[in-house]
Image (cartoon, rainbow, N blue to C red):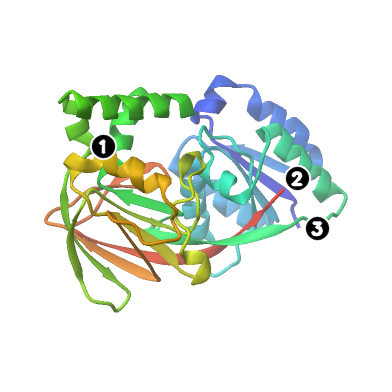
Amino acid sequence: MSGIGIITNPHSKLNKRNPGRAALLGYILGSQGRLEVTNTLEDLGRVAKEFKDRRVEILAINGGDGTISRTLTAFIKEYGATPLPKIALLRGGTINMLATNLGIVGTPEQVLYRLVEAYAEGITFSSRKIKTISVEGHYGFLFGNGAAAAFLKEYYQHKSGPLGAFLWSLRVWLSSLFGGPLFNLVMRDLDMTLLADSGPAIRHSTVSVLSSTVEKMPLGYPLFTQMKNYQPTMEICSFTFNAKDAIWQFPIIMLKSQNKPINGKMSLVCHELTLEADQPFDYTLDGELFVSQGNKLQIKLGPDIDFATL
């Protein structure tokens, strides 16, 4: 066996602020494994092959949710039918949605220290399996189109941390009150058809369709509460109010219990979802932005990922 393999993304915001972090993580890792800095998708593919050949037992990822998604996609493609290593998340991103869902706390250095200490002493640490969702060859845990993708597309032009995301949301809200153009860039009515598993087609207007295999959204809000009763599934949430009403509909929905039916929010659980629109559309998967390859897109359950919950 070949111990722990670390992948660190030098382009994540937190890692850019601390360029010496990779060296410090390598120092903490010591002789227990190997650290690789991945600058490109090609680097990820190369490292996935090397780690597979070396039979790495634990893959630790130092980056945000987008880095985790990109890394898991590369490893799933490289490993094929071979089981992936156990995954450890070092909380190296700004939001760290997935790590929050797993209850992982601390800085990347603190999380890695706990991991290395347990590994060196042969301690069996607890773990949790979460199913991925597969979208056009990419793997992740939270999909969104419409307002979710439009918000990120605009936000990334002025990218900042959680406070910046809150202030950006406030700008969008104020834009709606005073008739500014920003709100209209983010909130639009979409005519979409949803086909969940073998159920009937649902043709409706929405401002955003979300799909997830984790309960909490970025910033920790527990929007997806139904799927835990119907495992293994993903939960679909479609916001069915008009774009012009979003300014007051979103807060009302978020203040209500997500365990009950809510006007303006359609929820369902399924194993596979097909989305169809009049034309290709933007979408996000764990914070990464894409454009659908056509006007029809399939979201499927992917493989389980076994996460170390340090």
Which mark is drawn over residue 124? Answer: 3
Depth check, mark 3 against mark 1: the one in front is 1
Residue at the outermost left position: 278
Q: In terms of secondary structure, where does tag 1 sit?
A: helix
Q: Which residue is mark 2?
A: 115
- Dot placed on the residue nearer the N-terminal end, 3 or 1: 3
Residue 162 image position (x, y, % from top left):
47, 29
Label 2 sits on what residue type? Leu
- Alpha carbon of mark 3 to alpha carbon of mark 1: how far? 48 Å
Residue beneath the point at 55% across and 37% down: 63
Residue 39's place in the image compared with 197, above or below, is above
Residue at x 29% of width, y 56% of height: 263
What residue sits 30% from the left and 46% below the top? 290
- In the picture provided, is 18 more to the left or to the right than 243? right
Disc 1 marks a residue whose amino acid type is: Ile
Q: Which residue is mark 1?
A: 247
Q: Is residue 148 above or below residue 13?
A: below
Q: Amino acid at mark 3?
A: Thr
What percent of the width, then of the height, locates residue 156? Answer: 35, 30
Q: Residue furthest right?
A: 121
Residue 17 coordinates in the image, percent (x, y): 55, 20
Looking at the rendered structure, the secondary structure element under dot 2 is: helix
- Give the CA separation, mark 1 to mark 2: 44 Å
